[in-house]
Image: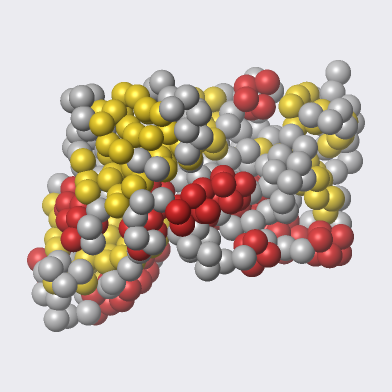
Amino acid sequence: MAAQGSGILVVGAGQAGISLVTALRELGDPTPVVLVGDEPEPPYERPPLSKSYLRGEHDRASLVFRDRRWFAEHGVELVTGDAVVDLDRGASGGRATTASGRVITFERLALTTGATNRLLPVDGAALDGVHAVRTLADADRLAPELLRARRVVVVGGGFIGLEIAAGARALGSEVTVVEATDRLLARAVTPTLSEFVREAHERRGTQILLSASAVRVHGDGSRASGVELADGTTLSADVVVVGIGVLPRTELAERLGLLVEPQGIVVDAQARTSDGVTVAAGDCTVGPNPFTRGVPGPTRLESVPHATDQARAAAATLAGHPTAYDQVPWFWSDQGDLRLQMAGLPAGADRVVVRGDVAAERFSVLSYREGVLLAVESVDSSADYVAVKRALEKGMTIDADAATDAAVPLKRLITGAHAAPSS
């Protein structure tokens, strides 16, 4: 039988966890909160870990969201370096057990458990010199090795892999990116932007290998020295970085008997899980999104804005006045001197409009389906990005033919809403 609790337990002290706790206090909910994180550090920013932090441009203190005083002043007990390993709950509350043996009772529960990196499933992947970046500790291990490395192989052509590749190249390393699919960033961006990103990295001296799979990491028994590909090629490497995606952390949700899919913990628009009382937010969840624009099925997003906005919806639900999570998805990625900004979801597009100068690396790609604006991908074109994001937020659109004229600011072309495209 679950214990009767009197407070709120938030499991997971990443972006979603700290955002949820902050939103609770902004909403005026005074209920005592226990925020539990398995890392020894207080909640911190993750985006710089694959970019400026690796280059030594951020110190550790600058990454921290809140100091210890803030938690004390706001009635939040922060528990770090101790993972919740078991959960039990009933209608009136529940109890959690941590790895250290501590028992925490609660009345209301939020799961912001995040995700964990996919492991490279090949021989040699556990050798020294093979890295993945998800946590501050990961970045601390990689940073000094990147400074010394002459040859770096990055396995995975997603955002994290490309950000690290750009940083390693800027530090003077010879860099090769190995991507198993036929284009970079295939799950997140249009083929048009994928091709531009490939060419841009190659212009900066990075070798990009598409439709190439790593089958083994070579080494001397202790440290990696190269990556063997499926075609028999072996790439020499002082450092190997793996960025092949993440897996949502759903173990605790499964213990509670909540509905879980391979993509994550299933939530509704108010961030409620299948039991109707537990909420979940961030990288661990999958749920409805109004900006899929006719593409069926729930959506899982991995981004700081998503974690923050969904956490606010979860906090409102916990505070007793549920509010639908309906924010426009937006993202950014700094890959060396390339600044990519994206708003909306381009999946399902039947037309793309390119405006600006691709050769000068200053342009935007607008995606449409059945004449309805879906998304924008901008490279050094912040005004286009802002205009499309604003149009999407207002349920409005921009005529595709008019958008081709780069001399006309997109903000002048925003017009009334169109009907959503069909499924």
Q: Is residue 315 above or below residue 88?
A: below
Q: Is residue 265 above or below residue 326?
A: above
Q: Residue drawn 27% across and 36% down?
A: 235
136 or 381, which is in the foreground?
A: 136
155 or 289, which is in the foreground?
A: 155
Q: Name the residue furthest front.
A: 220
Q: Residue drawn 40% across and 43% down?
A: 238
**Within the image, what quadrant is residue 367 found in?**
bottom left
Q: Quadrant of the C terminus?
A: top left
Does 75 sit left or right of 319 as displayed? right
Does 197 sit left or right of 16 as displayed? left
Q: Is residue 12 above or below residue 221?
A: below
Q: Please indicate, yes or no, whether residue 209 appears anywhere in the rendered image.
A: yes
Q: Residue drawn 59% across and 58% down?
A: 45
- Please provide percent x and percent y for residue 213: 27, 29
The number of discs equals 0
- Please provide percent x and percent y for residue 57: 52, 68
**Within the image, what quadrant is residue 233 found in?**
top left
Q: Residue drawn 15% across and 47% down?
A: 350
Does 127 sit left or right of 357 as displayed? right
Q: Quadrant of the N terminus?
A: top right
Q: In this figure, which colouring scheme has been used for the structure?
A: secondary structure
Q: Is residue 319 above or below residue 53?
A: above
Does 175 sit left or right of 250 as displayed? left
- Please provide percent x and percent y for residue 87: 76, 26
Q: Please indicate, yes or no, whether residue 162 appears anywhere in the rendered image.
A: no
- Please provide percent x and percent y for residue 370: 17, 50
